[in-house]
């Protein structure tokens, strides 16, 4: 029988890659979208004919119940969130509502349908924050450094709690930063790739950034959605760290991106206090051994290739 999946956050970066993967796997895919005065479905435009879009919002529990009734899913992927860390300081309560409590609303709606549904929660390496050990694994304690990180810790533990309390097949993927040409323009890798493409094409001359020393474990979103799916195919529910195991500075990302188009980053990059954070996460590097051993998961795209892919895609986009 054809399996059905529901993706919240289907219009986001990960939602679009996951929808592609599930459609390729033969699923009937439902995507939850929220009402907006202007439709912004660019990332899923190429899939529109193959997707069922259903209206709902993580802020409205009754809408989630209706979405579940309408879609009758076998698997639910909760990717929707306020996902930009700086916004979590300017809108901390809303971030807690979307990113934290939204998970409980969805789990409660699931519980009341009493269906045998598998649930995936998009947890984050941002939960490790001021890291207590390196590399970070499934057993590393959390020390979040932003309202977003705090909300994700809540979402993580409520998922664990519903698994243990109600015997739900509910798992959390603790995903480290993952990027792609579909990444939002406000995140640092895409900000860099888009600016490098614009500078190369003579559309601008300067790129203003914050902390160039922060280190992240950056992978490719297309690889990471494979891990989400694999987690829901296991016999027993468990949480996994998904990462490349390599970490690089923001400065290295800048260097690789400018070098790819033959430019010297020092001529264009300006450090700007406005992009510094009240509390920074200095270093993230994940240990994906459990995912490798139990899911057979490996990242295919590495850091420099990822940055170059994003620059090339932005040059193509801006040249159109
Ligand atoms: P994204 O591009 O920012 O997408 C977020 C999605 O959530 C969008 O589809 C957005 O819809 C939707 N959304 C936001 N608030 C909502 C609400 N109240 N009700 C319903 N939908 C709502 O994020 P992403 O990079 O794909 O990340 C997917 C998930 O993984 C997020 O939960 C994120 O926190 C988590 N995560 C991401 C990374 C990463 O590096 N990318 C790492 C770890 C964890 P609109 O289009 O309407 O705004
Ligand atoms: O690209 P970022 O904004 O991503 P951040 O904060 O690591 O969060 C992303 O990854 C998390 C997983 O760990 C996700 F949960 C979360 O949803 C999101 O997808 O910033 C990366 C680093 C930071 O250290 C930041 O201070 O880049 C530094 N940075 C330096 N200049 C900048 C800038 N970040 C942004 N966004 N813009 C800058 O100009």
Image: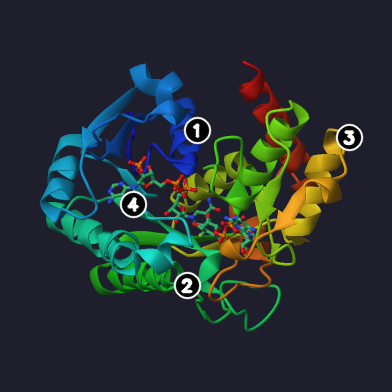
Say few, some or many: other residues with alpha carbon within 10 Å of mark 2 (under 14 / 14 to 19 / 20 or more): many
Label whose residue precedes the other's in the sequence (2 or 1):
1
Label 3 vs label 2: CA separation? 36 Å
Q: Which residue is mark 2?
A: 146
Label 3 vs label 1: CA separation? 35 Å
Q: Is residue 157 left or right of residue 16?
A: left
Q: Which residue is mark 1?
A: 21
Badge nearest the viewer, 3 or 4: 3
Residue 214 or residue 64, whichever sits in front: 214
Give residue 262's mark: 3
Say few, some or many: other residues with alpha carbon within 10 Å of mark 3 (under 14 / 14 to 19 / 20 or more): few
Residue 41 is situated, as x and y percent measured from the top left of the image, at: 38, 29
Residue 128 is situated, as x and y percent measured from the top left of the image, at: 56, 74
Q: Which residue is mark 4?
A: 118
Label whose residue precedes the other's in the sequence (3 or 2):
2
Residue at 68% across, 63% down: 289
Give residue 211's mark: none
Label whose residue precedes the other's in the sequence (2 or 4):
4
Label 2 vs label 1: CA separation? 31 Å
Q: Secondary structure at mark 3?
A: loop
Q: Secondary structure at mark 1?
A: helix
Residue 111 is situated, as x and y percent measured from the top left of the image, at: 18, 59
Q: Is mark 2 within 8 Å of ligand 2?
A: yes
Badge nearest the viewer, 3 or 2: 3
Say few, some or many: other residues with alpha carbon within 10 Å of mark 1 (under 14 / 14 to 19 / 20 or more): some
Residue at 58% across, 43% down: 221
Residue at 63% across, 23% down: 318
Label 3 vs label 4: CA separation? 48 Å
Say if mark 3 contacts mark 2, CB within 8 Å: no
Say if mark 3 contacts mark 1, CB within 8 Å: no
């Amino acid at each position: 029988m054809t399996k059905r999946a529901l993706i919240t956050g289907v219009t986001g970066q990960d939602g679009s890659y996951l929808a592609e993967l599930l459609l390729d796997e033969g699923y009937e895919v439902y995507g939850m979208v929220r009402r907006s005065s202007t439709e912004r479905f660019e990332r899923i435009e190429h899939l529109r004919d193959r997707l069922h879009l259903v209206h709902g919002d993580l802020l409205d529990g009754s809408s989630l119940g209706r979405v579940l009734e309408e879609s009758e899913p076998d698997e639910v992927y909760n990717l929707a969130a306020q996902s930009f860390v700086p916004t979590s300081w300017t809108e901390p309560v809303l971030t807690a509502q979307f990113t934290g409590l939204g998970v409980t609303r969805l789990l409660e709606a699931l519980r009341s349908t009493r269906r045998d549904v598998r649930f995936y929660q998009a947890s984050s390496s941002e939960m490790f924050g001021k890291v207590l050990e390196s590399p970070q694994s499934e057993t590393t304690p959390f020390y979040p450094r932003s309202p977003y990180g705090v909300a994700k810790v809540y979402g993580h533990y409520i998922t664990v709690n519903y698994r243990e309390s109600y015997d739900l097949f509910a798992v959390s993927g603790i995903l480290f930063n993952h990027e792609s040409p579909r990444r939002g323009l406000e995140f640092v890798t895409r900000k860099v790739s888009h600016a490098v493409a614009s500078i190369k094409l003579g559309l601008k001359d300067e790129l203003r950034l914050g902390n160039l020393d922060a280190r992240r474990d950056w992978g490719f979103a297309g690889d990471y959605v494979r891990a989400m799916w694999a987690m829901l195919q296991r016999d027993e529910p468990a949480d996994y760290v998904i990462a490349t195991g390599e970490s690089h500075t923001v400065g290295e990302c800048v260097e690789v991106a400018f070098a790819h188009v033959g430019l010297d980053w020092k001529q264009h990059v300006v450090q700007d206090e406005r992009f510094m954070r009240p509390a920074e996460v200095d270093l993230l590097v994940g240990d994906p051994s459990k995912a490798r051993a139990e899911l057979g998961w490996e990242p295919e795209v590495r850091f420099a290739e990822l940055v170059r892919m994003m620059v090339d895609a932005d040059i193509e986009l801006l040249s159109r």
